[in-house]
Every structure is written in C-alpha cells, then in structure tokens.
Image (tube, grey):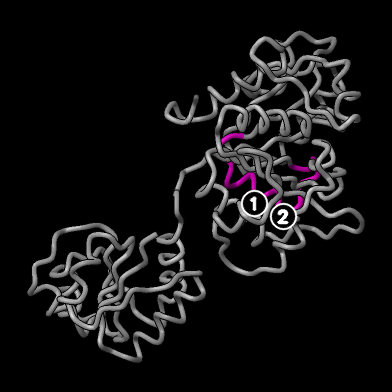
C-alpha cells in the first residue's frame, strides 16, 4: 500500500507531520524537493505540500490530482498563502497547530485500504421480548451471507449479549470495554481486525459480568469506523435510550421498531417511538403477529411498515443450542431479511 507523501525542507514542520502520522497509524514518504516527489505524486493517497516548497512544486506543473493539502505553520490568513494553495492544486490550507486534529483524520482516511460508505440501521424493541435482538442478528447474518461486509453492534448493556445469541460468546476478540479504553478515532481496518469475525460478519458485544455504559464518544467512533469499513452496520439498541443509543439513532440511516400487533405492544411502542423520534427521522415498523391487523397497528403507530416478522416456534430452541437459524429465500425469516436489505441498502450494495 502506498504511503502519504510530504514535500518539505522545513524540519520543524516535518517533525510535526511525522508525529501526527504516527497518531493516525501512518508512515510517510518524504521528499525534500519537487524532483524527488515526482515518482510518488500520482501514487500517494494523500500529498502534503509544505508552504516552503509550494512555489517550487507549482513551477514543475505537476499533473492535477485529488487529495492535495498545503501545510503551513503560519497562522495569518494572507492572500499569498491562498495563491500558493491554488498554484499547487491543493483543495485546502491546513494551519498547524490549529488544524492538527483535522490533519490526523485526513492521514487516517488516507490509510484506509478499502474505504466504503456503509448504511447504518438501528433496531429497537417496541416492548420487552418483541424480537429486536433476533431481527438484528438475523439481518446481519443474512447480509454477511450475501457477501456484504457487516458489523453487528450490541448497544444494549443489559441485553445478555448478541455474541451469546449467536452462540459465539467464547470467541476471542475485542469487546466494548477494550474499545472504550481508546480515545479518538478508530481505524476501520483496526476495528475489523480486533473484533470476533465469522466470514463477512464482525460482532461488537460486551464481556460477561459487570457492564459499564458505552461512552458517547466511543459509540460515535465505532459508528464512523463502521460506516467507512463496512457495507452495513446493524445496531441493536436498548428500549430505554441512554446517551450512546441516542448517538446511534442520530447517525442511523433508518431505524426499525419491532412490536407485536396487539394493544399492549402498540401502546408500548408508541411510547418508545415518542422518545426515539427526538433523535432520528426515518423510523419504520416491523410487526409481529397479534390480535390487531397490520393496517390498524401501523395506523396507530403513525409510521410506515417495513415488514412482518413471523413467529418462529423453533427459533428459540435453535439459538439455545448454539445453532444459527436458516435464512434462505424460502424461509419466512430469510425472505423478510432479504426484503429489508433491498429496501434499506443502496442498489449498488444489494447482491
């Protein structure tokens, strides 16, 4: 993999850039003159042109390319700096140390081996036992079975663990406490490498025993990394929204609210919906069979129906044996998941 390119003779600036690259998990190719940079110009994922070399770079008329930044230690917003920016074909001026965080993120982005723009789907239960965790797990399993790179996030600290639901609680890999200890940005490739994975499915759950709430910043970092590194991110949320769950809702493309089509289930789901709607806009209902017909239930909720989750009498026994449910196109549960994926994912991501 090619490395970001730096063109500068300013040793103070270079020291700063090497330090920031290390923070982003990157190494740099360094050219002290434009002639030395020529072989790397078109190959580097990111080019950082020091202000001291901007005029010399412009004089060589390098080929136009994306992802070029002009880096300066000068804090003054003078016209000459912007002239140099245009002359080297840079898209922005980065002033250090004021823009240090932004530059670290640019460097981290440059090191992502396979950047994606994944879809984030949150799943909420309208009441306890509605089946939100089962739908989250099955949706993620079906997506990964269709060769979509999928991240399943257990965001309910008191839910018992999605890894246990999948019969994978003994698998080695990072859990929430391991990620909470880190601050700032998480690389999507590092996240994929750290989590327990089964084919194209990666699972982020909790350790057994005492569980701490997920910090908002940790949830934000995981979702950002998930969006960059996966085709689909499915987050199973608690009904009583904590700050981390609210953060997930705010970043969701779509939220699925699972509820039985009965009076108590719908009344409870309306309460959950009133809170969730403060954080996100696209909420759709997934209905379980009940005494109410689907039309009455969705009209009472006031949101569109995304699908119907059939009763699966043998599903609980299957999961308790550590086996995964069959999600083929001829099964009712598999057909629901396939339909949801077609509706929730962009056409180019759908197999």
Check contact, mark 2 vs mark 1: CB within 8 A.
yes
Q: Along the horizontal axis of the image, is 328 left or right of 99?
A: right
Q: What element carries label 2?
A: helix
Q: Magenta includes 120?
A: no
Image location of residue 183, percent across then percent down? 63, 69
Image location of residue 304, percent across then percent down? 61, 21
Residue that numbered label 1 is attached to: 247
Q: Magenta includes 246?
A: yes
State the image quarter where residue 125 is shown. top right
Q: What element carries label 1?
A: helix
Image location of residue 138, percent across then percent down? 71, 28
Image location of residue 224, percent across then percent down? 55, 53
Q: Along the horizontal axis of the image, is 104 left or right of 226?
A: left
Q: Which of 294 and 55 is in front in this view?
A: 55
Q: Which residue is drawn at 66% across and 33% down?
A: 140
Which residue range is magenta in the image? Answer: 237-254
Where is 104 relative to 194, above or below?
Answer: below
Q: In the drawing, what numbered circle is on residue 326?
A: none
Where is 221 relative to 146, above or below?
Answer: below
Question: Is any part of residue 300 visible from this angle?
Answer: yes
Tag 1: Cα neighbours inside 10 Å, few (<14), some, or many (≥20)?
some
> Could you give the CA–CA distance between mark 2 and mark 1, rounded to whole angstroms?
6 Å
Q: Residue at x 31, y 78 (%)?
A: 30
Where is 237 relative to 174, above or below?
Answer: above
Q: Residue at x 29, y 72 (%)?
A: 48
Q: Residue at x 71, y 64 (%)?
A: 180
Q: Along the horizontal axis of the image, is 47 left or right of 310?
A: left
Residue that numbered label 2 is attached to: 243
């Amino acid at each position: 993999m090619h490395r970001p390119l730096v063109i500068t003779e300013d040793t103070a600036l270079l020291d700063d850039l090497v330090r920031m690259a290390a923070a982003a998990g990157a190494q740099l190719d360094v050219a002290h003159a434009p002639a030395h940079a020529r072989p790397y110009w078109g190959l580097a994922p990111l080019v950082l042109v020091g202000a001291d070399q901007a005029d010399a770079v412009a004089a060589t008329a390098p080929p136009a390319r994306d992802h070029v930044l002009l880096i300066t230690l000068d804090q003054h917003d003078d016209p000459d700096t912007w002239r140099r920016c245009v002359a080297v074909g840079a898209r922005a001026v980065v002033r250090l140390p004021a823009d240090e965080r932004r530059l670290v993120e640019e460097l981290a982005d440059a090191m992502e081996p396979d950047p994606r723009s994944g879809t984030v789907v949150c799943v909420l239960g309208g009441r306890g036992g509605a089946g939100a965790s089962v739908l989250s797990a099955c949706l993620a399993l079906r997506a990964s079975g269709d060769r979509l790179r999928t991240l399943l996030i257990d965001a309910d600290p008191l839910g018992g663990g999605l890894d246990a639901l999948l019969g994978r609680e003994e698998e080695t890999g990072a859990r929430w406490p391991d990620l909470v200890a880190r601050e700032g940005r998480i690389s999507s490739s590092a996240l994929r490498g750290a989590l327990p994975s089964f084919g194209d499915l990666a699972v982020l759950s909790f350790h057994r025993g005492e569980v701490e709430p997920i910090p908002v910043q940790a949830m934000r970092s995981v979702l950002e990394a998930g969006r960059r590194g996966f085709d689909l991110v499915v987050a199973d949320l608690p009904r009583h929204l904590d700050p981390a769950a609210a953060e997930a809702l705010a970043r969701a493309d779509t939220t699925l609210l699972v509820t039985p089509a009965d009076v108590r289930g719908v009344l409870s789901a309306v309460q959950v919906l009133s809170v969730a709607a403060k954080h996100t806009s696209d909420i759709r209902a997934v209905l379980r069979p009940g005494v109410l017909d689907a039309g009455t239930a969705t009209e009472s909720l006031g949101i569109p129906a995304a699908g119907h989750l059939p009763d699966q009498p043998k599903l609980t026994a299957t999961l308790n044996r550590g086996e995964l449910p069959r999600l083929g196109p001829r099964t009712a549960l598999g057909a629901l998941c396939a339909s949801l994926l077609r509706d929730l994912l962009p056409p180019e991501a759908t197999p």
